Amino acid sequence: METPHVRMRGVTRVYPTETGSLHALGPVDLDLRKGEFFAVVGPSGCGKSTLLEMIAALAPPSEGAVEFEGKPIGASVPDGVGVVFQENACFPWLNVADNITFGLRRQPLAKDEIARRLDYALTLMGLTDFAAAYPAQLSGGMRQRVCIARTLVTQPRLILLDEPFGALDQQTRLLMGDELLNLWRATGATVLLITHALDEAAMLADRVAVMSSRPGRIIEIIETGWPRDRDSRIVSDPAFGAVTGRLWTLLRDQSLNALGPAH
């Protein structure tokens, strides 16, 4: 049996507070298969982003173990892992090309290798004609493409996405989802997506984990059954409605719990 690309066992996260502690997450057991597209949905405050941060070594687990490619995750982002957040992380004083290669220029790479990776990322993300443009000249969706491209050029084997399209309108999110699927297929990377949008999770993922209200636990993992060459046209498939309906059925009570006893 193939070793999971990411493995979490008995993982919890507890935060200290002025009055004691807050049990935010867990215990969570989770295996990510190499090369799959995996999404996580759950109520606000259930620990979705915390789960991602522990895989990215941005927050240590209070208990349990997190592994990437069979090795424990330490105190820094493991080699081979790329992270994209919702916030626009473009440097406004740099053009698109320089934003994308910002991290590469601090590595011992030859100039032709940097140029090759840049050209690949620009082409894959549809940014070739905007290489000399500055972030202020781009739409929100295009700025997020730049952030994804900056991660892509590091050639990650695991891509972690924390609600990367949350600030975009519905139509743009669907089109960005198509580009993300193209990226996933082209690179063969494992992708973990944290999202609050059920339709986004249902369209993009091979499997979707549904989390409970805080402390977040995984209550079910749903296999979508989509072909690998899918795109946003799948939202018109009757099976798509069945998947999103199942997700909402699982989430409704958890979301009400998160809102409090008045609901």
Image (cartoon, grey):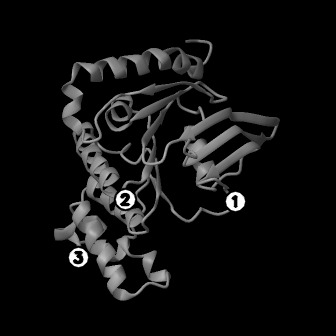
Q: Residues within 10 Å of mark 3 (few under 14, many from 20)?
A: few
- Residue under label 2: 148
**Front-most of 253 and 217?**
217
**Sequence-wise, which precedes: disc 3 or disc 2?**
3
Q: Residues within 10 Å of mark 1 (few under 14, many from 20)?
A: some
Residue 74 is marked as: 1
Q: Position of residue 178 (x, y in %)?
A: 25, 45
**Front-most of 158 and 143?**
158
Secondary element at image label 2: helix
Q: Position of residue 226 (x, y in %)?
A: 30, 32
Q: Quadrant of the N terminus?
A: top right
Q: Amino acid at mark 3?
A: Ala
**Front-most of 9 and 22?**
9
**Sequence-wise, which precedes: disc 1 or disc 2?**
1
Residue ID at (38%, 61%):
147
Identify the residue at the far bottom of this view: 111
Q: Report how far apart the C-alphas of labels 1 and 2 lie in the structure.
A: 24 Å
Q: Amino acid at mark 1?
A: Gly
Identify the residue at the far front of this view: 1
Q: Report how far apart the C-alphas of labels 3 and 1 lie in the structure.
A: 37 Å
Q: Report how far apart the C-alphas of labels 3 and 2 lie in the structure.
A: 17 Å
Eyeballing the image, is 217 above or below 36? above
**Front label number (3 vs 1):** 1
Residue 175 is marked as: none
20 sits to left or right of 210 = right
Q: Amino acid at mark 2?
A: Ile
Residue ID at (54%, 45%):
2
- Residue under label 3: 132
Q: Position of residue 224 (x, y in %)?
A: 37, 28
Q: Is residue 95 visible?
A: no
